[in-house]
Each structure stands twice: as C-alpha cells, then as structure tokens.
Image (spheres, grey):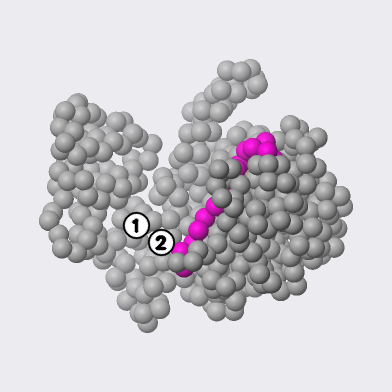
Amino acid sequence: MNIGICLDKSDFLYDIHSLVKSFFPDDDVNIYTDGDAEKCSTARDLLLRVNIPDYTDRKTAKDRLKRELYESLSDLTGRTLPWGTLSGIRPTKIPMKMLEEGMTREEIRASIRETYLASDAKIDLAVDVALNEKRILSEVPAGPDTYSLYLHVPFCPSICLYCTFSASPVSAWQKSMDDYLDAVILEMERQEMLGVLEDPGKEPVRYSAGGRKPVTFYMGGGTPTSLSPEQLDRLLTAAETNFDLSGCLERTVEAGRPDSITKEKLEVLKKHEITRISVNPQTMNQRTLDLIGRRHTVEDTVRAFELARKAGFDNINMDIILGLPGEELGDVENTLRQIEALGPDSLTVHSLAVKRASRLTKTLREEHMAGRTEDYSRYEGLSFYNSEAIIGAAYDAAYRMGMQPYYLYRQKNMKGGLENTGFARKGCECLYNILIMEELQEIHAFGAGASTKVLSEGGRIDRRINPKDVKTYLERVAARR
Ligand code: SF4
C-alpha cells in the first residue's frame, strides 16, 4: 500500500512518520507538507491529513498529537501497538528517570499508560529492565573517566542471508586474516589512531587511555571464533600487552556461530581469562537454519554448548531471533524447549526488523535467480511473523530459567512493533551491553567498523567509526603506518 500523510506545518515530521509506519510496517509511507499540494492531491491508497496545533510547550503538544493520531490509526486498522506512541530506541529511559524521581511502579505505570498508551505488560517490562539496570550500574564503576575496550573481528564461516553487519566470509579472506590481525594490533599499539580511520583527510585526534584500566573487554563480530586458535591467541595476547585488563569486571567473546567453536579455541579463551561467551543458535529448527544460510546444524549448537561447559565456561549466552521465515509459535516453542534443556546463563531475544525480513526475501529471490538455490517454491509464501504470544513464550522460557530482563532496545519497524531484550541470571548480565547502550563511558574500539566513543572537551560523546569494508580499513591503517 502507498500511504501519504499531508501536514499543514513541517513540525514533528519524524515522529508522525514513525508512528504511521508502526501501524503499516510493510507499506510505503510518504510525508508531505502543504507546500507539496500537488503531491498531496495525487491519488494514493490512503491519504491522511494531519493539522499541527499552535503550541507553547513542544513536548506536551507532540505527545498529544501522537495520541490523537494513534487513536485514529487504531480505529482505522483495528489494531493497538504494544508500546503505544513510544518510538525511541530506548523506552526504558522514561521509567529510569521516573524511578530516579522517586515514583512508585504504580505511578510510573499510570503515567506512561496515560501519556504514551503503552500496554501494562510493556510498561512492567520496561520498569523491570530499568530496576535491574540501576542495580547493576550501582555496582560498576561507570562515568566519563572510565572506558571499555572493544575488538572487532568481521569474519564469519558463511554469511547469513539476513545479515546487516557487513560480515566478510572466511573463504574470501582466509589469506588476509593475518594482515587483518596485524592492522588491529597496530591500531592497539598506536592508540593515537583511535577513531581517525573513518576519514583519511581528517587530522588525527589524539585520544589515549592515559593510564586508565578498561572496565570491561568485549570481542565481537562477525564471529571472533572464525579465527584459528593461534590467531585468537595472538589477538588476545596483543590486547593484554597493550592494555591492563586486570581491572576488567568481565571479558566477553561473542563466539556466536556454533560451527566455528572448537575445543582448542575454547582452551585459548580460557587461557586468556575470558569470562563470558555466546553460542548463538538463532533457532533450533533445522529447516529454518537451512533457509537463512547459517550452514550449521542444530546438533552443532548442542555440541558447541556442551564443549563450552566442559571447558569450564559458567557464563554462556544464547541469542535467538523471532520472526524468522515460516516460523510460528510451535517452531519457537521447539527452539525454547531445546534451549531450556541446555540451560544457558543468559538469553537474548531479538525480533526480526522488517527491513531485514524484506532483505531476506529479496536475497532468497536473487539466490534462486542466480541458480544458487534449487527450488524457490520452498521460499514462496513464507511468513515473517512475530506476535506478543510468540515473544511472550520466549520471555516465559527466560523466566523459567531463572533469568531477569536487564537491557532492552527497539529498532525501527520491528515485526509486531516489539523489542529486543536481554535476559540473564543474576551476576551473568553483560555489563558492556548496558554501558554501551547508556553511553555511560568511553568505548575504545579497534578493527573494521569498530565504533569508538570518546568524551570531547565539551563533555559530549564524540563518535568515530572505522571503515566497515575490510579492504578500506586495511588501506587506511597502512596509510598511517
Ligand atoms: S553470524 Fe551474525 S555477523 Fe555473521 S553473517 Fe550471520 S548475522 Fe552476519
């Protein structure tokens, strides 16, 4: 469907667009102001007219306008949205502030329900996350004078069809993986390069850890365990040589893909005192794994998890994605049953974003056209479905495993207007995830696509992102040797 929104003034464009998009996630939504009278009058499937009232207080006017628009859209579609008119990526910010002001859970619930029309279930979830976050942060030294260390490994055994992380397949980079390690190690040795690789024309901005110890260490990707045991050892040794990791409250390696995890690599991680790893199934249904190009089996996941337990890892995370092609409640329940049988220490529940779903559909079609999939008919008519019942089943499983929600974020156009939530047993939470989400400290990040955040002189967070493309990254590092 092609939806037009005609506004009499150009205020609140973004908020109005994202609210309408939440009701029509799969449709084209275009926004026009009266200046575009001709476009406004072009016949469309649906044309909405919104009049912006005069106002003195911008926030009150915006909240009211969104409520009115929400109610009209809800009447029109017969639907409500779990998060009501809330559209930001961090809905927990609101209850967090209210808790700091001393409001009770009941008062917070009433206020959010009235202002944003969110459901009680989502408000309670947000309050629970805010309370857990507050508890965890009270025990962690966080502040502008602290920092965490991040290393990025962009390689993966194969590229999942829905990947949006610019991952690079091991097969294409095998010969250059050592060059990549050389570059990351050089970046760590020469910290004055930190965050200046994004633009070769830019003057170096000299940041430095200045004798501080990182609070947490996180190696992410990609799939860090795509590296060989020797390469992993080399990278972790370089991190220990260039930084004093003795003060780290956690050391995480996002092992991720089960097909990349071996006994030897787990031993290397143990030797370097890695405290937390991920073994990410995404789904425990083989048919879905085959569809999304993960190229590993359900048994690989079980094997990798059991290997990790045997190697002594007592803090293992598992990631799942809801809304994968063709998966309905029964499929998700099967995944959850198998995960509960393994008993991880934390579970991250992701909802597939619409953009990823449509990208996946497009990729499946292209794969078929290029003759790389034998039978496109098995992809046709597949639904990408997520619902409160499905996400509710995932949350129930997390609670049954003794976990609590501790971080939550939303992306644009998530299936069913839902959210991504991290659950963990007490003491097994990923501190780095909270620190990065709340922007509570500096992040010194190394590797292709790594995003460094440092405090500028004015107290603002200055963000610099290394080039995502591995070749460009290597060239930029080489240019600064
Ligand atoms: S494992 Fe993650 S980073 Fe690697 S290809 Fe799949 S989605 Fe992308």
Residue sitting farthest toward the left:
54
The answer to which quarter of the image holds residue 161 is top right
Is 286 situated left or right of 361 in this image?
right
Q: Which mark is residue 60?
A: none
Q: Residues within 10 Å of mark 1 (few under 14, many from 20)?
A: many
Q: Earlier in the sequence, mark 2 or mark 1?
A: 1
| Magenta run includes residue 420 | no
SS at circle 2: loop
Asked whether 271 or 19 is in front, the reply is 271
Measured as percent of width and height from the top left, residue 412 is found at: 42, 47
Instruction: Give the residue number, with chain letter if any, for mark 1.
Output: 86
Q: CA distance from mark 2 to mark 1?
A: 7 Å
Residue positioned 56% across, 23% down in the render? 366
Instruction: Provide the residue span drawn in magenta.
Output: 459-475
Quarter of the image with the N terminus in it: top left
Measured as percent of width and height from the top left, residue 391 is found at: 49, 53
The answer to which quarter of the image holds residue 423 is bottom right
Check whether the beta carbons of the residues at disc 2 and disc 1 lie within 8 A of each other. Answer: yes
| Magenta run includes residue 465 | yes
Report the amino acid beneath label 2: Pro
SS at circle 1: loop
Instruction: Give the residue number, with chain letter if any, for mark 2.
Output: 91
